[in-house]
Amino acid sequence: MLTKTLQLGRPLTIEIPRDRNSMIAVCMGDTMAWIETVAFNEATGKLRKLYDRVSGPDGNVDNIMMAHSLRPHSMEGHMALYKNVLHHSGNALPKWVLEMIGVWVSSLNGCVYCVEHHYQGLRRLMHDDTRAEAIRAAIEAQDMNALPVRASERAAMNYARKLTEQPAGMDEADLRPLRDAGLSDGEILEINQVVAYFAYANRTVLGLGCSTKGDVLGLSPGNGDDPQDWGHQ
């Protein structure tokens, strides 16, 4: 079994298992990524236009986006997916719920980078540090019963865990607890897409060695009414 303790927003403790079939990549190192990346001030053409769209304060571009810099079209696809799945006004579920699911999935996948970024986003959206800390503690303990959330949100977290850990084991019956908790099929789709997006994002980060060096944690494209507005605030 993979044993890990993610102290979200604080110094990180990871216990690496001795099992040779288990592995966790820790993306908190001194380099931005294991592959070549193009800096903001060196970007030209389409890449510079994309950097301008996704940048935060002082031209800061998250390393997960900069990791796409050798293939700008893949950055464009990534941002379109990210914005529409997590930050679109057409979603019915609150943004903090979607971020909570993302932190949970990232924790299960051992992706420190995404945990750190999206936990800070969760805190900003909740405006309730005490409750956010309690959610963090429940995720660290992998105890969904300890989450200070409604039954529907707990059902979403349980669904996310099984889909993350046992995707081939999913069955139509796995939707029943979500429906019983009052979630519509559209909301179930939103939950499913968040889990799927973080499977992609976590593997992008873990497979390319992205670190949080230089990143401003917790920023997000907050203008949900404009899918084309990718600016991080």
Image (cartoon, grey):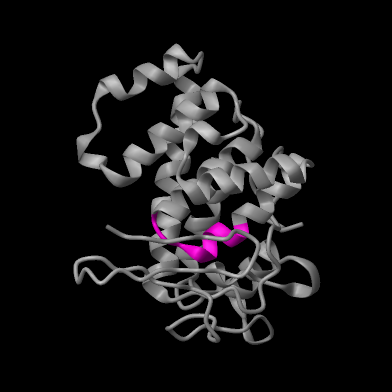
Q: Which of 148 and 179 is in front in this view?
A: 148
91 shown above or below 106:
above
Question: Residue drawn at (42%, 61%), measured in percent from left and top?
Answer: 4
Which segment did they paint magenta? Answer: 109-117
Whether residue 158 is visible, yes or no, is yes
x 41%, y 33%: residue: 158
Snapshot quadrant of residue 203: bottom left
Residue closer to the observer: 123 or 204: 123
Q: Determine which quarter of the picture holds residue 164.
A: top left
Is residue 15 placed above or below 70 in the rendered structure? above
Residue sitting nearer the eye, 129 or 79:
129
Residue 158 is left or right of residue 100, and the answer is left
Q: Is residue 223 visible?
A: no
Residue at figure coordinates x 26%, y 22% from the top left = 172
**Residue 34, how many percent across, how many down?**
43, 83
Q: Is the magenta stretch mostly helix, strand or loop?
A: helix
Above or below 196: residue 72: below
